[in-house]
Image: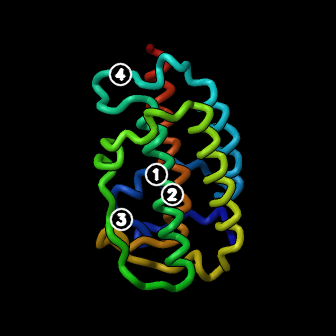
């Protein structure tokens, strides 16, 4: 399996293409592993006073953005698991704003958010390593859109790149 092969446009829907484009070139499994270490360190060093700040023009707090990225990765990894096994059951979309509005992480410390991300990403990397070569090309339907297993892996990496750039800018200007 060539883990450096980016997904083609036919493997992912419009908004996911933007995230795939943001993922760095190279082996996607190595990227996800490296990202894990960088992101855990970043989350652990967010100033506690900044966790619940909403920096205009954004509508979510720093904590909510981190929580959103964790939730998105968890959902995309579940989809990868289903599609990689050949499960062709169409999967529903998810409302990121509904997830953000529930605020379940407001009672969670930044260290627990970092731990949650660390354990989830570690688990996902192990899952992605056991997905068979042919399964990376499998296409499933999520939110009424076709997407490959490979595209979701690259999308996970690029989604974090996208949000980290915004978070770093927000915290630098705070």
Q: CA distance from mark 2 to mark 3?
A: 19 Å
Q: Tell me if label 4 and label 3 are in contact, CB under 8 Å.
A: no
Q: Tell me if mark 4 has few (under 14), some (14-19) or many (20+) residues whose alpha carbon lies within 10 angstroms of its own.
A: some
Residue of label 1: 71
Q: Tell me if mark 3 has few (under 14), some (14-19) or many (20+) residues whose alpha carbon lies within 10 angstroms of its own.
A: some
Residue found 54% across the figure and 58% down from its top: 154
Residue of label 4: 55
Q: Which of disc 3 and disc 4 is earlier in sequence?
A: 3
Seen from the viewer's position, the closer of residues 8 and 85 is: 85
Residue found 38% across the figure and 29% down from its top: 61
Q: Which of disc 4 and disc 1 is earlier in sequence?
A: 4
Q: Where in the figure is residue 45, as x and y percent of width and height?
A: 62, 24
Q: Where in the figure is residue 146, as x and y percent of width and height?
A: 37, 74
Residue 13: mark in rendering: 3
Quadrant location of residue 41? top right
> Is 150 placed left or right of 16 in the picture?
right
Q: CA distance from mark 2 to mark 1?
A: 5 Å
Q: Tell me if mark 2 has few (under 14), some (14-19) or many (20+) residues whose alpha carbon lies within 10 angstroms of its own.
A: some
Q: Tell me if label 2 and label 4 are in contact, CB under 8 Å.
A: no
Q: Tell me if mark 1 has few (under 14), some (14-19) or many (20+) residues whose alpha carbon lies within 10 angstroms of its own.
A: some
Q: Where in the figure is residue 126, as x and y percent of width and height?
A: 70, 63
Q: Which of disc 4 and disc 2 is earlier in sequence?
A: 4
Q: CA distance from mark 1 to mark 3?
A: 19 Å
Find numbered disc 4 in the image and state the secondary structure of the residue it sits on.
Answer: loop
Q: Tell me if label 1 and label 3 are in contact, CB under 8 Å.
A: no
Find numbered disc 2 in the image and state the secondary structure of the residue it sits on.
Answer: helix
Q: CA distance from mark 1 to mark 4?
A: 21 Å
Q: Where in the figure is residue 54, as x and y percent of width and height?
A: 35, 24
Residue of label 2: 74
Task: Single out the mark in the foreground, 2 or 4.
Answer: 2
Residue found 28% across the figure and 25% down from its top: 57
Residue found 60% across the figure and 37% down from its top: 112
């Amino acid at each position: 399996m060539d883990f450096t092969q980016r997904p083609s446009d036919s493997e992912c829907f419009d908004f996911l293409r933007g995230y795939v484009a943001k993922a760095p070139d190279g082996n996607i499994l190595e990227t996800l592993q490296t990202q894990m270490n960088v992101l855990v360190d970043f989350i652990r060093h967010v100033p506690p006073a900044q966790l619940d700040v909403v920096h205009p023009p954004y509508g979510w707090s720093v904590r909510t953005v981190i929580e959103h990225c964790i939730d998105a990765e968890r959902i995309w990894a579940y989809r990868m698991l289903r599609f990689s096994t050949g499960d062709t059951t169409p999967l529903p979309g998810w409302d990121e704003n509904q997830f953000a509005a529930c605020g379940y992480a407001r009672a969670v410390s930044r260290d627990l958010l970092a731990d949650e991300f660390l354990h989830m990403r570690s688990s996902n990397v192990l899952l992605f390593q056991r997905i068979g070569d042919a399964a990376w090309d499998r296409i499933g339907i999520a939110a009424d859109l076709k997407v490959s297993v490979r595209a979701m892996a690259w999308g996970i990496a690029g989604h974090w790149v996208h949000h980290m750039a915004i978070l770093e800018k927000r915290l630098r200007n705070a």
